[in-house]
Image (cartoon, rainbow, N blue to C red):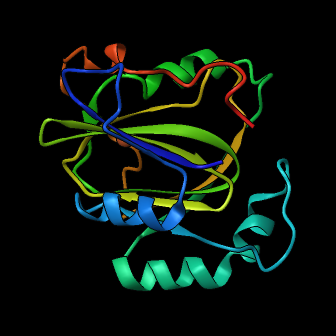
Amino acid sequence: MSRLRIFSENDPSTPRLSTSDHAEMAVELGRIGVAFEQWQASAPVAPGDAPEKIMEAYRADIDRLVAERGFKTVDVVSIAPDNPQREAMRTKFLDEHFHKEDEVRFFVAGSGLFTLHVDGEVYEVKCEQGDLIAVPDSTRHWFDMGPEPSFVAIRFFTEPDGWVGHFTGTDIAQRFPRFEKGQAG
Ligand SMILES: [Fe+2]
């Protein structure tokens, strides 16, 4: 189940809000400029499907978003729990960073934990199958796929270089909850 928890940046133990209601999540995230939507596949998809098949199943939504936001590149990432690179892949996104373009991800399958750091508050967003999250450029954030990652995501880029992260050098991500074993799925 998708979930949003909002914490003070100084108190990682007690969220001031916790909700799994998609509409409420969209309203709260909308206040900080983050788009949160649910998409339905037009055809069944499963982890391991070819990227072309996944893109085709969500073609109408992808085309709409590309037209609205001017994305140049769309790709698919698919990571299974036995991926030999999983530790390095997890570590790559674990510390606070930002981008000079929006970070836009659609979860075709599986789940992951996006955490955003905005105006003294920390927004922890557990994304599940069907969730689209669009984080504005310059927003400080981190992403945890967990120790046994299992997800398929469509990624949208406006810059030709793909993923470029600017790390802030803070330790805030280490003070907030990680995506633990057993949460995935
Ligand atoms: Fe990022």
Q: Residue at x 13, y 35 (%)?
A: 120
Q: Residue at x 68, y 75 (%)?
A: 58
Above-or-below relation of 157 to 13: below
Q: Position of residue 50 (x, y in %)?
A: 82, 57
Q: Position of residue 133 (x, y in %)?
A: 45, 58
On screen, residue 55 versus residue 155, left or right, reads right
Q: Position of residue 57 (x, y in %)?
A: 76, 75
Above-or-below relation of 8 to 55: above
In this rendered view, identify the residue nearer to me: 71 or 97.
97
In this rendered view, identify the residue nearer to me: 51 or 46.
46
Q: Position of residue 83 (x, y in %)?
A: 75, 24
Q: Which quarter of the image is occupied by the C terminus?
A: top right
Above-or-below relation of 185 to 136: above
On screen, residue 65 versus residue 173, left or right, reads right
- Figure quadrant, ligand 1: top left
In this rendered view, identify the residue nearer to me: 93 or 162.
93
Quarter location, residue 12: top left
Q: Residue at x 69, y 32 (%)?
A: 184
Q: Residue furthest left?
A: 119
Q: Residue at x 26, y 57 (%)?
A: 136
On screen, residue 147 versus residue 102, left or right, reads right
Quarter location, residue 130: bottom right
Mark count: 0
On screen, residue 114 versus residue 30, left or right, reads right
